[in-house]
Image: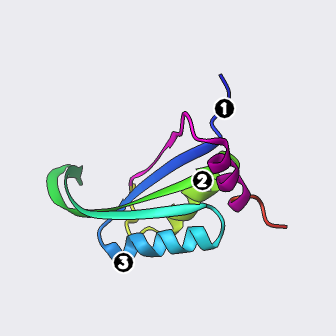
Protein backbone atom coordinates (compact mmCIF):
# COMPACT_ATOMS: atom_id res chain seq x y z
CA UNK A 1 0.00 0.00 0.00
CA UNK A 2 1.31 3.44 -0.89
CA UNK A 3 1.06 6.50 1.32
CA UNK A 4 -1.76 8.94 0.58
CA UNK A 5 -0.75 11.88 -1.59
CA UNK A 6 -3.88 13.90 -0.86
CA UNK A 7 -5.42 14.60 2.54
CA UNK A 8 -8.79 16.06 3.45
CA UNK A 9 -8.54 18.27 6.54
CA UNK A 10 -11.71 19.47 8.25
CA UNK A 11 -12.50 21.98 10.96
CA UNK A 12 -15.69 23.54 12.26
CA UNK A 13 -16.21 27.16 13.29
CA UNK A 14 -18.97 29.15 14.98
CA UNK A 15 -19.56 31.45 11.98
CA UNK A 16 -19.39 31.38 8.21
CA UNK A 17 -16.98 34.32 8.33
CA UNK A 18 -14.56 32.37 10.55
CA UNK A 19 -14.63 29.42 8.16
CA UNK A 20 -14.10 31.67 5.14
CA UNK A 21 -11.16 33.42 6.84
CA UNK A 22 -9.45 30.09 7.50
CA UNK A 23 -10.16 28.93 3.93
CA UNK A 24 -8.87 32.10 2.27
CA UNK A 25 -5.78 32.35 4.47
CA UNK A 26 -4.51 28.79 4.15
CA UNK A 27 -5.16 28.60 0.40
CA UNK A 28 -3.37 31.94 -0.12
CA UNK A 29 -0.46 30.61 1.97
CA UNK A 30 -0.42 27.40 -0.16
CA UNK A 31 -1.05 25.15 2.81
CA UNK A 32 -4.16 23.90 0.99
CA UNK A 33 -4.82 23.70 -2.73
CA UNK A 34 -8.54 24.29 -2.29
CA UNK A 35 -11.24 24.78 0.32
CA UNK A 36 -14.97 24.29 0.68
CA UNK A 37 -17.13 26.02 3.28
CA UNK A 38 -20.48 24.42 4.10
CA UNK A 39 -23.16 24.99 6.67
CA UNK A 40 -24.75 25.80 8.84
CA UNK A 41 -25.04 22.46 10.58
CA UNK A 42 -26.60 21.76 13.95
CA UNK A 43 -24.10 20.14 16.30
CA UNK A 44 -24.47 18.40 19.65
CA UNK A 45 -21.31 18.17 21.76
CA UNK A 46 -19.70 18.13 25.20
CA UNK A 47 -18.13 21.42 26.32
CA UNK A 48 -16.88 22.23 29.83
CA UNK A 49 -18.46 19.00 31.12
CA UNK A 50 -21.88 20.08 29.86
CA UNK A 51 -23.98 18.88 26.97
CA UNK A 52 -24.37 21.65 24.43
CA UNK A 53 -25.66 22.28 20.96
CA UNK A 54 -25.37 24.99 18.38
CA UNK A 55 -24.74 25.94 14.80
CA UNK A 56 -21.37 25.39 13.16
CA UNK A 57 -19.80 25.91 9.74
CA UNK A 58 -17.45 23.34 8.23
CA UNK A 59 -14.32 24.14 6.26
CA UNK A 60 -12.85 21.23 4.30
CA UNK A 61 -9.37 21.65 2.87
CA UNK A 62 -7.46 19.54 0.35
CA UNK A 63 -3.75 19.34 1.02
CA UNK A 64 -0.70 17.19 0.43
CA UNK A 65 1.03 14.89 2.88
CA UNK A 66 4.02 17.25 2.79
CA UNK A 67 2.20 20.18 4.45
CA UNK A 68 -0.68 18.49 6.31
CA UNK A 69 0.79 19.08 9.77
CA UNK A 70 1.72 22.71 8.99
CA UNK A 71 -1.84 23.24 7.78
CA UNK A 72 -3.27 21.85 11.03
CA UNK A 73 -1.03 24.14 13.08
CA UNK A 74 -2.05 27.17 11.01
CA UNK A 75 -5.75 26.37 11.43
CA UNK A 76 -5.15 26.22 15.18
CA UNK A 77 -3.56 29.69 15.06
CA UNK A 78 -6.47 31.14 13.06
CA UNK A 79 -9.31 29.38 14.86
CA UNK A 80 -11.54 31.49 17.14
CA UNK A 81 -11.92 28.69 19.71
CA UNK A 82 -8.98 28.63 22.11
CA UNK A 83 -9.60 25.22 23.68
CA UNK A 84 -9.56 22.17 21.45
CA UNK A 85 -11.26 23.00 18.15
CA UNK A 86 -12.04 20.19 15.78
CA UNK A 87 -9.16 19.73 13.36
CA UNK A 88 -9.24 16.29 11.82
CA UNK A 89 -7.73 14.76 8.71
CA UNK A 90 -8.28 11.69 6.60
CA UNK A 91 -6.18 10.38 3.76
CA UNK A 92 -7.85 10.36 0.37
CA UNK A 93 -7.51 6.70 -0.57
CA UNK A 94 -7.77 7.35 -4.25
CA UNK A 95 -7.74 10.34 -6.58
CA UNK A 96 -7.01 10.66 -10.25
CA UNK A 97 -3.33 11.37 -10.82
CA UNK A 98 -3.95 14.83 -12.32
CA UNK A 99 -5.86 15.89 -9.21
CA UNK A 100 -3.16 14.61 -6.85
CA UNK A 101 -0.53 16.42 -8.94
CA UNK A 102 -2.58 19.65 -8.74
CA UNK A 103 -2.80 19.39 -4.94
CA UNK A 104 0.92 18.68 -4.64
CA UNK A 105 1.84 21.51 -7.02
CA UNK A 106 -0.12 24.15 -5.16
CA UNK A 107 0.98 23.02 -1.71
CA UNK A 108 4.66 22.69 -2.58
CA UNK A 109 7.13 24.51 -0.34
CA UNK A 110 7.73 27.98 -1.71
CA UNK A 111 11.39 28.92 -1.88
Where is residue 8 shown, x and y percent of the image? Answer: 50, 48
Figure check: 24 above or below 63: below
- N-terminal of the two: label 1 or label 3? 1
Residue 18 is tagged as none
Residue drawn at 44 percent across, 67 percent down? 79
Magenta includes 95? yes
Residue drawn at 53 percent across, 39 percent down? 92
Where is residue 49 shown, x and y percent of the image? Answer: 20, 49
Disc 1: which residue: 3
Label 2–label 3 contact, CB within 8 A: no
Decide if residue 57 is on the left or right side of residue 31.
left
Residue drawn at 24 percent across, 54 percent down? 47
- N-terminal of the two: label 2 or label 3? 3
Residue 17 is tagged as 3
Provide the secondary structure element on which disc 2 rests.
strand
State the CA–CA distance, disc 1 to disc 2. Answer: 14 Å
Figure check: 80 above or below 72: below
- N-terminal of the two: label 1 or label 2? 1
* Label 3: how many Cα within 10 Å (few below 14, some 14–19, many 20+): few
Provide the secondary structure element on which disc 1 rests.
loop
Q: How is the image coloured?
A: rainbow
Q: What range of the chain is rendered magenta?
A: 86-106
Decide if residue 79 is on the left or right side of residue 72.
left
Provide the secondary structure element on which disc 3 rests.
helix
Disc 2: which residue: 63
Decide if residue 62 is on the left or right side of residue 103.
left
Q: Nearer the viewer, residue 92 or 90?
A: 92
Amino acid sequence: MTAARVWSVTSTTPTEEDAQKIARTVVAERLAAGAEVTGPAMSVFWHNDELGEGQEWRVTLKTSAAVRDRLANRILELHPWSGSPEIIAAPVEWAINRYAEWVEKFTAAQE
